[in-house]
Each structure stands twice: as C-alpha cells, then as structure tokens.
Image (spheres, rainbow, N blue to C red):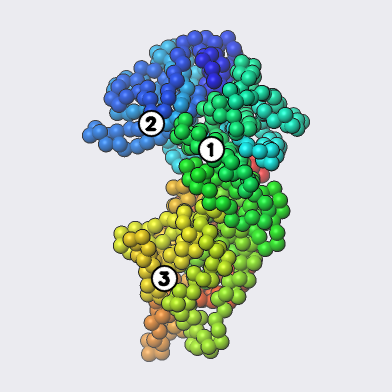
Amino acid sequence: MTNDKFLLLKRHPCSKNLSDELVNEIANRCEVIHCDLGEAPQQINQAFHSVYLMIHGRMRQTLYDFQGRMIATRFQVAGEQFGALAAAIGEPAPMEIVAEEPSTMLRIDYRACLALNQKHPEFQHNFATMLANTVLKLAMKEREHQIPKNVAVLHQSRETRVFTQRLANRLTELEELPHVITDDEQWKAIDGIPDYQISTSADGITNAGAIQQKLAEWANAERLLIDLDNKRPQAMAAILEFADKILWCVTLENWEQSVAAFQKILETAPGWANKINVVWILPGDCRIAPLAPELNDPVRRNFKLSFETPPAKQSNGLINGFERVIHQLRGVRIGLALGGGAARGMAHLGILKVLEEHGIVIDMIAGTSVGAMTGILYCSGMEPDDNVERFIEDLTPPWIFRILPNGGYWYLLWKYRRGHFDSMLRKYLKHSRLEQLTIPVQSITVDLISGQPIIRSKGDAVHAITESINLPVLSRPINRNGQALVDGGIVNNVPADTLVQNGCNFVIAASVSASIKPEFASNQSTTPTHKMKQASAISTLLRTYVVQNVNMNSVGVAPADFVIQPDISEFGIAEFTRADEMAEIGKLKTRELISKLRELLCTIDPTLFK
C-alpha cells in the first residue's frame, strides 16, 4: 500500500512506544522489500547478513538437514521477524524463505541493527521482546496462535454489515479499543471507537494517501477492523495484502454471487486462502449450511453463525458461532474430545448441555465411537436433552429382546447385523456432510487394511458415525474406498491429541471409560472358583471392549488440559434406555467442575472467560 519506510515501520511491533524521531532514524537504515508469490529473498545455504521485519504477507521458512531433506516448516507473518538468530551465527544457513503470498518487509543490516540496539535501550527492549516471541512460538508449536491485528471484513451485500458493528461492540466489551476503517456510508458510530470513512471505486481506494496517514496515526492500535464491500477488486487487492485475517461474509441468498470475486482474489494470490475465513450468517432455524465447495474448500476455516434465537429443540451451536469468531481473533481455540464407551456415552449429552448453559463455547469437537455419534449430532444442531429422548426412543429394545437374558446385548447385535444405525441416524442428519455442520467435528475410526487410525473431518456425516461405532465381531468391517473400517476405540478412545494437532490450545476431554465395575457375569474377585459362572460369548466380547477402553483411557486424556470423568460404571454398555440417567450424571459432574474449568480458561484469556 506504500513504500514510505517510516509509515511501514510504524506498523511493526519493534516501533512500539518509540518517538517519531527514533522510528525515522531506524527507518532510514532499512530497505523496503516486496516479494511476489514464490519469490525467495533468502536461498538455501546462504549466510544471513540482515534482519527482515515482516510488515504484511506470509513467508514460508523451510529448514533442511545436511542431506537436503526438509525437516521443518514454519510461517512468518506480519509483526514478526526472521534472520536475527541466523545472522548472529554468521554461517550459511540450511534454510529457505519463500513468499506464500505477496509480502512486504523491511530489511536492515544485522550490524546496523546491533548498533541501534546499543544506542537506544527502548528499541533494544522491543527487539528482545520480538526475539522472545519467536522462541515462544517455536516452543508452543500448534498451541500458540497469531492474534490478528488488522482484520478485513468483506461483504457481498448490506445484510451482513451488522456483523462488523457487533464485532466492534464485542471487542470493546473485552476491553479492546478497535479502530474502524469503513466504506459503509450507513456506518453507525459507536461511542469510544475511532472510525474513518473511506471512498472506494472499481479502480481502488480514492483517498489512499489520507489512509496511509491514518494508518500511521493508528499504528499503536491493538485492533484495526477494515470494513469493505467485496465487489471492488482493485480496492480489495491492496487491503488483502495488508490484512492479517480476512472475514468473508455471506448469506444463504448471496453466497453464489460472491464466488466470482472470491476466485479472482485467489487467482491473484492463492496463499491468501490461508488467512481467509468464510463467515456464514444464517437464519436461526438453519441447521445445515450449504456445502459451497467454491468458498469453503480453499480456506482454512469457516464459521456458521446466526443472530436469531434458535427454535425449540435446537442447540445454541449456531448462535454461539459469533463467539467462535471472537475466539479466533483472540487466539483461542477450545476443543472437546468425546470418548467411546457405547451406551455410557449418553453422559456426553449432559456434559454438552452444561457447557452450553455456562457459556463455554466449543470451537471444535473430536469423537470416537459413541463420542463421534453424540458429537456429530450435537454439531448438527440437535439440542442435548432432545437427543437423550431420541436415543431412548430409537434404542429401546422390542419386547422380545426385553424378555431375553442379556436382551440389551442381543438387541445391539441385531441392530449392527441388520445395518439399522444408518437409517436411524439419517432421520436426523439426512445426507449432510461433516463440513456443513455448525461446529467443526472429527470422527475417529480404524482401517484394518493399513492398521492406521482414520480421522474424518469431511464427508457423509452418517458414514462418519457408523464407521466409528462399528464394533468388531458385532459387525463386519465397513468396506469403503479401499479401507476396512471398524470402531476407532481400538487405537484412540479419547482423541484429545487430534484436537491439539488441529490447533486447539485448550482441550477438554470427556471420558466415560475411566472406571470399571469390578464384576463380570455375576462374578467378583471374592467369588470362589467353584461358584463362578460362565459368561456368554457376546458378554465376554463387550466386556473385553470395556476393559480395553479403561486401559487406554489414560493415554487418550494425556494431551488434554482438563478432564471430565463422570462415574457411570454401574451402567451396562447396552443400556441406552437409561440415557436420561447417564446424561444427568454427566450434568452433575460438569456442574461440579465448571468453576475450576473457567479458572483454567482464564489462564489463556482472563478477559474473555472472567
């Protein structure tokens, strides 16, 4: 947007609280570097002699071993630096830096940078803080998120303009002071929030010079919201390069009209997809969003939200979508891992209900077996208490099974062997896909051909459930796309690790298999040998499943930051008719722990969770 070194440096954290005279002195020692997509300012095995200050854009940093094999990749974004540590070593670095999108940097000679550090303690402090943040980011890996300072909010029509107003208000409630640049002639000023009206045309921004001065004036603002119509491609190109995060707002009625502009942007710089989030603003009664692969597939995340009260028997998942956007902007991602345990997983519904009641908004769910089933149904918009009633209704055995010994087990076997779970679940999920659901969700299953766990985040939602609950022996493997799929609990019964790998920096694990009733086939540890009873084949199989889950429980919950483990060992794993009792135990346990959970959440964002 500009080549003025002073204005560019004012945007970088290393100039924080520095006088304009000092910023100008440092800027005069810098060189502006623009990199188009694919350009490499630093080649492999070249020595670093400079420090690069990232102003905007995204650079891929790849580290190689002595045989030229890639061993690590990370990304440098606005507000960061690269080259300082490598320049300090003074030797050729096995590292390559390549632009992932159009990027702008300030390059300063390393020795000149050292001299400025020695001369100006306040600059030295900022520079040391920047280096410390680099080390922290490396140490935290997936759990450390960039907090975007410059957020572009793009609109296809007036209907979504309310989103930016609400965004500014909510950030103010969280003790931020967002600054707003907007081309909305109907923007409603918000008390205490600085705003600046701009004019745009098909040729770009008409008062670009004044905007540069305003950006310099607002250089120390912790958050800048740039609110624009997305139908002006020349104006957007400059803004998209500058923005750290892009929120592309669409509705059911207008998303198709925005596809052409969206594709034009990605043609300009495919790497911009990494910072675009599609924001679906939907009616309150909408449970399944459009698939819209033209928008959803290229981007890293999408959000589904509504500002309308949901109807009865629908969860708050959609209305909580707005808070998920706030989480993203605050660098927070809360994951919930729901473990396997057959009917005992009905306790998950109680846990979900209490978390919702207490305003603990979940950003992502991963589930194994019954955890996948309860999690996916919840993410589809089904209200937890209503879900309890549906499970009791759908899984109460007919009278013939109720009069049989172990009738619940035999009924479960019959349901599996007849393939009834698919038709049962389609009553609620139809042919929806995981990527259409309100909350991002993953299911865990196992492929017997490769012997590896399979993590589903896309595809038919019912298939994702039936694969994950497919107990070996009770049912044959599901053969699909070259895989033979069975219950994910064989290898990963509480998939907290999956959520960490997907960027969740606070993970709650809900386990229903932490304890086991010390009794089997009416035998206890004190039962004399001659009085012990023989177990049936099916009860032996299901008991083996329970024992395996209990022994794998500690492994699954290990990566979690908080664990909820209701004791439901008294319930049989086929007792779906007691779903309401198990859900109630889940509620009681979660209410008991909720204050401790909120206390821990405050460690990652005290203001957001106070």
Closer to the camera, 148 or 255?
Answer: 255
Q: Quadrant of the N terminus?
A: top right
Of the residues under marks 2 and 3, which one precedes in the sequence? 2
Disc 2 marks which residue?
Answer: 61
Which residue type does callout 1 highlight? Ala
Where is residue 352, by image quadrant? bottom right
Dot 2 surroundings within 10 Å: few (below 14), some, or many (20 or more)?
Answer: some
Residue 207 lies, with reference to residue 454, above or below; the image says: above
Secondary structure of the residue carrying tag 2 is strand
Closer to the camera, 512 or 189?
Answer: 189
| Real-space CA distance between mark 3 and mark 1, rounded to the nearest whole angstrom | 46 Å
Disc 3 marks which residue?
Answer: 471
Mark number displayed over residue 260: 1
> Can residue 574 be seen in this snapshot?
yes
Residue 528 lies, with reference to residue 121, above or below; the image says: below
Secondary structure of the residue carrying tag 3 is loop
Pair 1/2: label in front: 1
Residue 66 falls left or right of residue 580 = left
* x then y, percent, for residue 236: 57, 29
* x then y, percent, for residue 582: 59, 70
* x then y, percent, for residue 60: 40, 31
Closer to the camera, 596 or 315?
Answer: 315
> Can residue 586 be seen in this snapshot?
no
Secondary structure of the residue carrying tag 1 is helix
Dot 3 surroundings within 10 Å: few (below 14), some, or many (20 or more)?
Answer: many
* x then y, percent, for residue 334: 55, 48
Which residue type does callout 3 highlight? Leu
Of the residues under marks 1 and 2, which one precedes in the sequence? 2
Dot 1 surroundings within 10 Å: few (below 14), some, or many (20 or more)?
Answer: few
Residue 179 falls left or right of residue 379 = right
Residue 494 falls left or right of residue 398 = left
| Real-space CA distance between mark 2 and mark 3, rounded to the nearest whole angstrom | 44 Å
